[in-house]
Image (cartoon, rainbow, N blue to C red):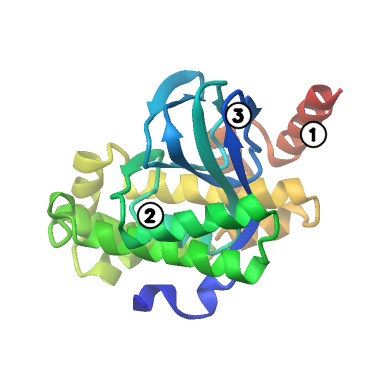
Amino acid sequence: MNERLKGDLYVELSIKSIDKFTSNFNSKLSSKYHSLIYILDGIATIVIDGKETFADKFDLLYFNKRQKIEIQPGHYTILQILFDGTAVNELIFESSFNQFKIINVIEGSQLSYDLYRLGHLADNNSHPNLLALGLLFEVFYELTKDSLNTKDEKVYGKQYHIKQAKRFMNLNYQKNISINDIARSIGVSPNYLADLFRTLDEVSPKQYLTSLRMEKAKELLLTRRYKIKDVAKMVGYDNQLHFSSEFKKYSSFTPRDYVIFTIQNYNKDKN
């Protein structure tokens, strides 16, 4: 198995549900989890953040937990896998699924076989978590292997440096790291790294790091288990006031107001 998929970092990946649906299924996916949808047959119409897209047989789609997804009724059979865990960001990043993406799975490939086995577990409504989890790891391994072997990704060029920089940030956002630290970790100058991000991602390294920290902070705040000063430290800010200021710039809410607003909206939708 690929060495990136070994080690304690990856044990915190958990499957929340595996389901198979045939035709006339209308669902708004849970915004609490990441999801993979595999089209086993037919064509599915999927609304992503209000925009309609179509997925054909053997298409595999990834959605992150922040996206609003609705599957429209139609003639199709789909496999839906909801998952979460602290390993997710790294797995998504390594498999090049860092944003919504559709991959056409080659029929008869190892990836199609692993997805077929997950579908079989859903059919029998008896998916032991360990077996299902192992298969999901295999799916990510195949996606990682495929992305690393794709010439169009230019793995050893500029995109490789950006991927390595993002990987470093994903693993170290909770520490007091600087742009100099990020650049040093991949062997380039800070100015070169900033130019790469502006050219290829249209954001600065600092903006990417801030976004990463703020999204993690939102998750931690909504658990309501931590004080704001603790959340600040958990996402790399020693100073609570600095964290609160950055959070408000990013979300237009103070950390406390964000929690109140989100919970009120959730209760309103629930009722």
Find disc 1 in the rendering and name its residue.
263
- In this view, the residue in front, 66 or 55, is 55
Neighbour class for label 1 at 10 Å: few (<14), some, many (≥20)?
A: few
Q: Nearer the viewer, mark 3 or mark 2?
A: 2
N-term mark: 3 or 2? 2
Picture layout, residue 260 above or below residue 163: above
Q: Position of residue 162 (x, y in %)?
A: 26, 55
Q: Report helix, strand or loop for mark 3.
A: loop
Find disc 3 in the rendering and name its residue.
252
| Amino acid residing under circle 3 | Ser
Q: Position of residue 174 (x, y in %)?
A: 54, 63
Disc 2 from disc 1: Cα separation: 40 Å
N-term mark: 3 or 1? 3
Q: Is residue 138 left or right of residue 96?
A: right
Q: Farthest right residue?
A: 271
Find disc 2 in the rendering and name its residue.
112
Q: Report helix, strand or loop for mark 1.
A: helix
The mark total stands at 3
Q: Position of residue 261 (x, y in %)?
A: 75, 29
Q: Nearer the viewer, mark 2 or mark 1?
A: 2
- In this view, the residue in front, 130 or 207, is 130
Neighbour class for label 3 at 10 Å: few (<14), some, many (≥20)?
A: few
The quadrant the N terminus occupies is bottom left
Q: Residue at x 63, y 24 (%)?
A: 26
Disc 3 from disc 1: Cα separation: 16 Å
| Amino acid residing under circle 1 | Ile
